[in-house]
Image: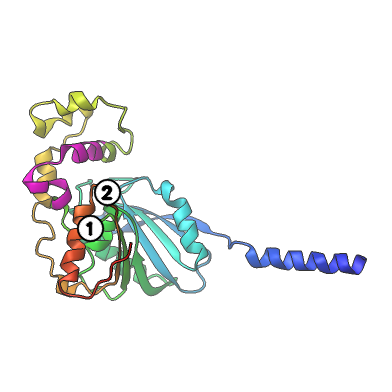
Amino acid sequence: MKIIYFFSMLLFLSGFVSFAQPVINKVQYAFTVDKGIRLETDIYFTDTVAKYPVIMMRTPYPRKQYVSIANYFCSKGYIMVVQSVRGTGGSGGRMMPFINETDDGLSMLDLLTERSWCNGNIGMYGSSYSSFCGLTLGAAKHPSLKAIVNINGWVEPSIIARPAGVNHLMMNIPWMLFNYSNGKLIPGKYNADSLLNTVPVNTMLKGYGIDITLDQMQEGIDGLNKDMDYRNFDVPVMHVTGMYDFTKEGTFNLYDSLRAIIKCSVSS
């Protein structure tokens, strides 16, 4: 009986060891990009002795909300890099939606490729704005960018921010309030009806301590990426969207643009 019990314990322990999750470490690091701007970044890893493929997500939203995603990818053999874009999450510079993401993203691909723990294979992951941060790099032909997961993302911001050339106030205003207040101004923290009745509309955010106008936000994105040459978009992309996603027009626009020149498949 003792022998049977002993071997039963060995089998249990061996099973426990085989299913044990790797220890995942996290360090916070500031990467320096153009003009000395420092971008705060969380790096998740199991070890840095070997070389690993890297998944990068760049976001204007709090990095801490992506811990479970980072842990999942690390458990599958990746290093996960979650970075706050300019003017958010402690990163330097000013948050100007979309404007700096191409240059900063390419700089990050270079910086990550140089790291001893990166094996030269980098994928971009994220939804909405984070998807844009990956997709805007798609035609750059960076040798380290190997794949992009696009969840409700877009390449041309004006498609979702200014449909038919008109400001999408119900989307732009809550989004700007959230990001320019570092996540403090959420629906319920302000009177939306009163805000949307403010005139002139262009300066409606000044009452909340936000000095950027709608015109300033839009002047940089009108036409942004409209000249992207999709023939150079040689990175595999997985597109995900849904019938009721308010950014689906941007996702489908990208899919149709790529489908016109390369082979794509559709699943439901």
* 170 falls in the magenta region: yes
Classify residue 7 as left or right of residue 211. right
Stretch of the chain drawn in magenta: 159-177
Q: What is the secondary structure assignment of the residue under circle 2? A: loop
Q: Which x, y percent locates residue 90?
A: 34, 45
| Foreground pick, 31 / 45 | 45
Residue for point 35% across, 54% down = 83
* 67 falls in the magenta region: no
Location of mark 2 (residue): 245
- Describe the colour scheme in one phrase: rainbow
In the rendered image, which quarter is residue 37 located in?
bottom left
In the rendered image, which quarter is residue 34 located in?
bottom left
Among the two numbered marks 1 and 2 on one chain, the one whose residue lies closer to the N terminus: 2
Q: What is the secondary structure assignment of the residue under circle 1? A: helix
Location of mark 1 (residue): 251
Q: Which x, y percent locates residue 247?
A: 23, 50
| Amino acid beneath label 2 | Asp
Task: Look at the numbered discs 1 and 2 and tell me whether their residues touch, using CB distance below 8 Å.
Answer: yes
In the rendered image, which quarter is residue 260 located in?
bottom left
Q: Which x, y percent locates residue 114?
A: 36, 71
Classify residue 69 as left or right of residue 218. right
